[in-house]
Amino acid sequence: MADPIKLLLNDIKLSRTHIIELIKDIDKDGGSLKLSKDHWNIQEIIEHLVLAERGGFDLIFTAAENFRNGTPIWSGPSENTGQTIEEIIHRTWKEKETAPPSATPQGKWSLGVWTSHFKNCDDLLLNLIPVLKDLPLEEVIYPHFLCGPLNAIQRLEFIRFHIDRHFHQISNLKKDLGI
């Protein structure tokens, strides 16, 4: 039987590769172009993805560590049990959501810097393999600020979903900006 964590990490890597391909020819100037002041540019989207993914990694790691120590972050029933991340998001999100402060871009670095960090997130996630080993993944839960309690599998599904969601946003932005 295939390891569900490795399969999910592979899905995330594939989604990440699609975005990296999509932005590979965009220079610093193209990465900072905006449609309007209230829309993120491509560099800000990539920065957001990095910040959100690092935060997701931290929460999965914390939930696993606490579960192992006998002090789970979440225990008891969850309204998300048995649901895919797509089902959960459909039920809990509005069409456009606001990122939490921890994942809101600050515009500190260029697209090139954030793309390098984005590529390195695959290596970061590989560190979860030993952390999650032999744990009941459905019981390793850390609540998401919009979705509610997400288990380790749902959290990894979320990372993939989130990257894919922003892939479409970047595709449309490139088209609208003519880059």
Image: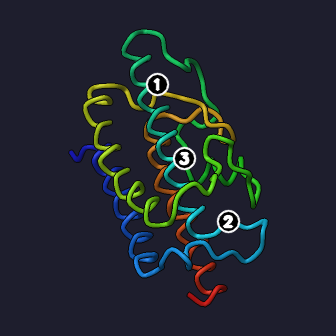
Under circle 2, the secondary element is loop
- Expressed as whole percent of the image width and height from the top left, the position of residue 117 reads 40, 54
> To which residue does mark 3 refer?
52
- Which of the 4 image quadrants contains residue 60? top left
Under circle 1, the secondary element is helix
- The residue that appears at 30% across and 51% down in the rendered structure is 7
Quick one: label 1 or label 3, which is nearer the N terminus? 3
Other-residue count near label 1 (Cα within 10 Å), few / some / many at <14 / 14–19 / ≥20: many
Alpha-carbon distance for marks 1 and 3?
16 Å
| Nearest the eye: 81 or 165 | 165
How many marks on residues? Answer: 3
Under circle 3, the secondary element is helix
- Please determine whether, in this image, residue 143 is positioned above or below residue 162: above
The extreme bottom residue here reads 178
**Picture disc at residue 40:** 2
Other-residue count near label 2 (Cα within 10 Å), few / some / many at <14 / 14–19 / ≥20: many
